[in-house]
């Protein structure tokens, strides 16, 4: 049975062109890029070419504003803990209530160390409360960090406006752009971004490599120390194959943004969404449907558990993910849906479908065929379902 992969916000397939570009650097061009000899020096040139490719994806003014990291989590940590080091007298950070744990958890660590952290609320559609941001920011705020697009709902935030508010109060601005890179055009210069995090495996690159954009002139204290690499901004021997991989993935992402792929993906997403809404009762779409990335829909099926839906979908080789981030011993729905005040009976039955350029018409038709009977079956056995009321 063909696998239908609609979990591309979790990770994407590494593009064949990316794998091909990486392979020589494992066994043929394996020199250390920091070495003095030509064998290693050639890899230094390859790294700088990849740096330029990533800079182009973000429209950075200078290629050296790109620092290669192991992942976006490291990039995020680097910015947050840099602020703690760089601004000891401005111990206030503002972020949002719907950030990825890669932002929320380090913020909680900083809170435990005496920092003041405020979490901006969102409305029922996941839209940022800009007025709350304006009321919270002050002259002690060192950093504002707001994601470019939400990983669960795909909602896009007004990054340029937030950056302007931050700068007007003397704060730096960071955005976790993991779920935006490769899906919508990113322009760090036009948006006024100081720091930006991305991860290659979210746009058909390899896992284990990310990048951090640091605007020239922005105050930044290295997170990893112990070597001169990345101009002393991130120590550690350069992971040449994976750097080549993120560079190639960035190049391919730029081409997709220019060739209309996003519109085709959005059309498939809308068809999936509309088909489910027309075939299944007690269903709602979560997030701002007018301002979201083209590949994502988060749909709540009332009165049943998302994990049960996923298990049935898995029987048909359909891969998706649950908006209900339940862990052992907890039945709480995701913090994103709670922040949006999604009703309890819907929050637990949320499924995120995230498409890619590899998604086909046939994939969507298969999901639309299987979803209605799955929901009907689960509602018949659910103690919360209206069917059994």
Image (tube, grey):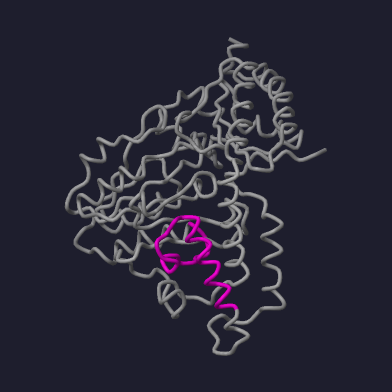
Q: How far from the left and from the top, in percent, is residue 289? A: 48, 28
Quadrant in the picture for residue 75: bottom left
Instruction: Report the front residue among 71 and 186.
Output: 186
Q: Is residue 279 left or right of residue 104?
A: right
Asked if the magenta segment contains residue 52, the reply would be yes
State the residue lying farthest toward the bottom: 37
Q: Residue at x 64, y 18 (%)?
A: 379
Q: Is residue 70 left or right of residue 357?
A: left
What segment is highlighted magenta in the picture? 43-72
Q: Residue at x 66, y 34 (%)?
A: 310
From the image, which quarter does the C terminus lie in?
top right
Instruction: Report the front residue among 139 and 261.
Output: 261
Q: How far from the left and from the top, in percent, is residue 112? A: 31, 55
Q: Residue at x 62, y 11 (%)?
A: 387
Asked if the magenta segment contains residue 50, the reply would be yes
Q: Is residue 364 left or right of residue 323?
A: right
**Most common secondary structure along the magenta stretch:** helix
């Amino acid at each position: 049975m063909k696998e239908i992969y609609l979990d591309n916000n979790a990770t994407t397939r590494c593009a064949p062109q990316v794998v091909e570009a990486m392979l020589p650097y494992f066994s043929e061009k394996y020199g250390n890029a920091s070495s003095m000899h030509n064998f290693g020096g050639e890899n230094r040139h390859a790294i700088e070419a990849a740096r330029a490719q990533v800079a182009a994806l973000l429209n950075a003014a200078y290629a050296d504003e790109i620092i290669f990291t192991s992942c976006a989590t490291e990039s995020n940590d680097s910015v947050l803990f840099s602020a703690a080091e760089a601004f000891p007298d401005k111990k206030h950070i503002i972020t949002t209530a719907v950030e990825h744990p890669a932002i929320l958890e380090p913020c909680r660590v900083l809170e435990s160390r005496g920092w003041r952290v405020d979490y901006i609320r969102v409305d029922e559609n996941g839209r940022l409360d800009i007025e709350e941001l304006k009321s919270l920011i002050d002259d002690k705020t060192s950093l504002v960090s707001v994601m470019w697009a939400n990983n669960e709902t795909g909602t896009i935030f007004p990054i340029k406006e937030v950056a302007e508010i931050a700068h007007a109060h003397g704060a730096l601005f960071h955005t976790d752009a993991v779920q935006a890179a490769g899906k919508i055009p990113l322009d760090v210069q036009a948006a006024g971004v100081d720091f930006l995090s991305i991860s290659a495996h979210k746009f058909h690159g390899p896992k284990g490599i990310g990048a951090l954009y640091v605007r020239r002139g922005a105050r930044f204290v290295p997170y990893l120390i112990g070597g001169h690499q990345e101009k002393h901004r991130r120590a550690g021997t350069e992971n040449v194959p994976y750097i080549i991989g993120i560079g190639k993935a960035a190049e391919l992402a730029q081409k997709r943004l220019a060739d209309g792929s996003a519109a085709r993906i959005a059309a498939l997403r809308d068809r999936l969404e509309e088909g489910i809404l027309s075939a299944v009762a007690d269903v709602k779409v979560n997030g701002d449907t007018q301002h979201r990335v083209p590949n994502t829909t988060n749909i709540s099926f009332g009165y049943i558990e998302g994990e049960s839906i996923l298990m049935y979908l898995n029987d048909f080789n359909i891969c998706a993910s649950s908006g209900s981030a339940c862990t052992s011993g907890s039945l709480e729905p995701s913090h994103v849906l709670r922040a949006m005040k999604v009703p309890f009976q819907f929050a637990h039955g949320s499924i995120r479908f995230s498409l890619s350029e590899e998604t086909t018409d046939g994939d969507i038709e298969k999901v639309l065929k299987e979803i209605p009977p799955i929901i009907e079956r689960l509602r018949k056995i659910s103690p919360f379902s209206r069917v059994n009321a």
